[in-house]
Amino acid sequence: MQQEAPALRLFRGLLWLYPSEFRDHFSREICFAFADRLREQPTLACLLSMYWGVLTEAPKEHYHVIRQDITYTLRTMRREKVATLTAVLVLALGIGSTTTIFTLANGLLLRPLPYAHQETLVTVGELPPGAERPNAVAFPNFLDMRARNRTLENFALFTPGPFTLRGDMEAERVPGATVTASALPALGVAPLLGHWFAPEDDQPNAPPTVILGEGLWRRRYGADMAIVGKSIIVGSTPARVTGVMPKAFHFPDVAEMWVPLRSDPKTNRRTDYFLRGVARLAPGVSIQQAEADLCAVMDQIKRENPRETFEQSVKVEPFRLRTTASLQPLLFTLLAAVGFVLLIACANITNLLLVKASARSREIAVRGAMGATRMRIIRQFVAESLILGLAGAVCGSALAAAAVPGMMRLTPPNFLPSWVAFSPDLRILGFVVAVTMAASLIAGAAPAISSSRHNLVDALKEGARSSTPGSGKARLRSGLVVAEVAMSILLLAGAGLMIRTFFNLERQRTGFQPENLTTLVASVPGNRYPGGEPAQQLARRIRQELAALPGVLGVAGASGVPILDGWGRSLTAEGHPVLSLKDAPIIQHTVVTPGYFQTIGLPILDGRDFTEQDAKDSLVTIVDAAIARRYWPGQSAVGKRVRYGPPEYNEPWHTIVGVVDEVRNQSLRAQGNHSVYLPYREFSSSTSSYLVRTRAGMPDPGGALRARMAAIDPGIAISRVQTMEEILSRSVWKERFFATLLAFFGGLALLLAAVGLYGVMAYTVSRRTHEMGIRMAMGASSGEIRRMILRESGRLIAAGLVLGLLGAAAVTRYLETQLYGISPTDVPTLLAAAVVLAATGMAASYLPARRATRVDPMIALRAD
């Protein structure tokens, strides 16, 4: 039976802090293979064992020696306060940055979900051809897949969406979700009070029921223990409360109440995608097996319903990916970035310890000559690097604890699911221990190995009046500086690309004027304002009342707000081929009131705006310029007709009365999302949006709008009161977050590289004082000495820049999916990063070069 190295036991122990799916990647065979590699490298194996021994397994007879090493190290550090504080600060920055980003990754990717047996909880979605991420699930397809699959348990559907609570208190919009009765059995969470929905509650004609979240139950209903069985007003309909969920339950993200789906399969089409699937894997079934099984079922559905289905397949993924899939590339890139920062910090500490080892070369050689073993000398350097690492870890952890809340302020409120938390846990502690050990090993290995190869004669030569620039230690120090510069240019290039991406998106043309535009969502009580004329009268009254407010320039109603809301349907143009649902373009639909285009600042390029008469008795529409160019190039689209929806539905033709400019509907990145507009006669929802144009500088427009809406009818629930500029800012939060952090880490890498370059050049100048004295005594001017030092520094910087730019050209390609409007190998950005780094490096080298010119030749010649 093979014995594992002590360091391997530590490594394997740390792995048990992580979920089983992560531990599975590190099998026993891999650990033994690593152990075999260690046996081939006795020096590295010795260092690993020493680190382990100093921490945990040092024999009792060695305690005295170890205590001596630690005491001697602390005494040395006390004498060299500036160098020690610099080393601790550098390590704290490296370890703190790495711990901060790992804390984010831990909260999003590793922290257990608040559901039982999370490893078997999956999402199910239909995957359109060519798509990377799964779509929602059509309800009829769900029924067929649930009945025919052999690999899932408790297959359920859900869709998040707010609800309006009314009654004796003020109307309130509450985040919630519509779910099937099988959702809770799939999640494995028991209610706090009452029970979950029964299957009969999920039938199309079943009486309305509702389940409350613990927070809502306490806040609005005073933690009434008799709430189960009572009726509350949801929307405009009484619903019986069947249960209260525990405090930690907010499925799917931040929901506080749930209602049953109660969907009728006869009224749902196989092309209506608005429901998400969640399920449990059957015992012994893998994700791949479940996906293959569901794809086979979907093939059967497509054969049975050729006119109602696309060429879609089915995608099964771990439930966590539903939230974290879009964030994983960002997190992994940030982890790589802070890894470079940590390596630069380690290179700095290695250089510092090499300098200290060179200064102590005589002492070490004498100790060796007097009988000190190589292991004894290595242990001394191990103790020093460990103490520095532990001090850096303590300070770095404090920095990380302060940095995480600050970073969270860069994210939009309520963006992350409620189960995401960034508080410290054993996993973060294990990571800090592992990073500290790794940093200490990396920083201390080279000095320990090089100094243990002592030779008294060589040490006396090296301690002579000048050092040899081409010596092994000098080459190692120079190589570390080159590596620091190369890694810094990678981070600076990445930061530059993301900053350019962020500015490109901020400058992106939206098609309308977002300045001084405030939006809100109004949910009206349907029992007082049923659809049709009463709802239209209320919409007109709301517009008139809001327009009468001081400082308001225009008001319009709409079915949604650009960037936030979207509703797509297919389009068929008269006189053009009738395309099937699979081939027809999906067009963004928005229902608007007259004056909408003027209010949001969207110019009408041809034709006219809607009128109040259009809302009563005409089938008219307005399209954007992209649609007009596509179907009627070189001619006016006004007067042409289009039909919406699949051809087989035979919906009525709409006459085009106007053409407007294009807008970005879904996001600032999305292009080609064409838009059509319908008059508000087609309002069918009790919830609608209002967009209000105000004068610049109007104080608190949101508060004024809320007050006026409450005066119109206190039963109208108001939500999502925000400016369009806030909406646009939130839409690019990931790019802002990414650019801010990469810029910070790039600046940190630049600072550390400058410190490393300064340290090497300062040490070089101090060791070559005698040589410079001779040069100046023989007539060399101060400028020549300064240029000599700067040339040496320039060579190191140039070598690092060449390596870094080559690496950046390859590595930045992994950022391509995160970029917008810029190439990953953008030459101006790479050159700008190189210029900034070169200028900073030369500035850091100027101080040692200037000090070299102040050498007095007579003093230098007398110096040792």
Image (cartoon, helix red, strand yellow):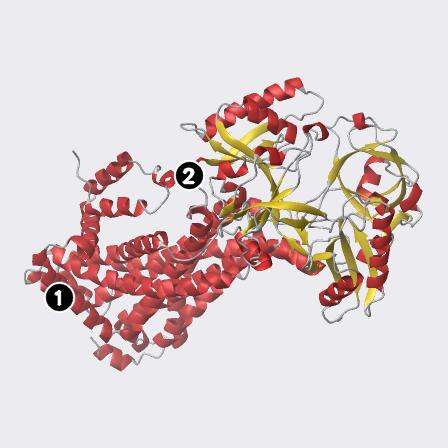
Q: Residues within 10 Å of mark 2 (few under 14, many from 20)?
A: few
Q: Position of residue 854 (x, y in %)?
A: 35, 79
Can I make out residue 569 in this image? yes
Going by the numbered disc 1, the residue's amino acid type is Gln
CA distance for labels 1 and 2 = 51 Å
Q: Nearer the viewer, residue 571 or 782?
A: 571
Which one is earlier in the sequence, the residue at label 1 or at label 2? 1
The secondary element bearing badge 2 is classed as loop
Residue drawn at the location 35% of the way across and 66% of the way down: 395
Count the numbered circles shown: 2
Residues tagged 1 and 2 counted as in contact (Cβ below 8 A): no
Against 682, is 371 above or below? Answer: below
What is the x, y in percent for residue 795? 40, 59
User: Amino acid type of disc 2?
Assistant: His
Give the residue pinned by disc 1. 68
The circle on residue 117 is 2
Work out which quarter of the rendered image holds the N terminus and state it.
top left
Q: Nearer the viewer, residue 506 or 412?
A: 412
Please identify the quarter of the rendering in which residue 616 is found.
top right
In the picture provided, is 793 more to the left or to the right than 570?
left
Q: Is residue 226 left or right of residue 91?
A: right
Q: Nearer the viewer, mark 1 or mark 2?
A: 2
Q: Which mark is residue 80?
A: none
Residue 482 in percent (x, y) is at 38, 56
Q: Residue furthest left?
A: 370
Q: For the residue carrying disc 1, how many other residues have a C-alpha within 10 Å: few (<14), some (14-19), or many (20+)?
A: some
Q: Quadrant of the C terminus?
A: bottom left
Tell me if residue 601 can be seen.
no
Judged from the image, the secondary structure of the residue bearing numbered disc 1 is helix
Residue drawn 73% across the image and 71% down it? 699
Which residue is more in the foreground, 626 or 763? 626
Q: Position of residue 483 (x, y in %)?
A: 38, 55
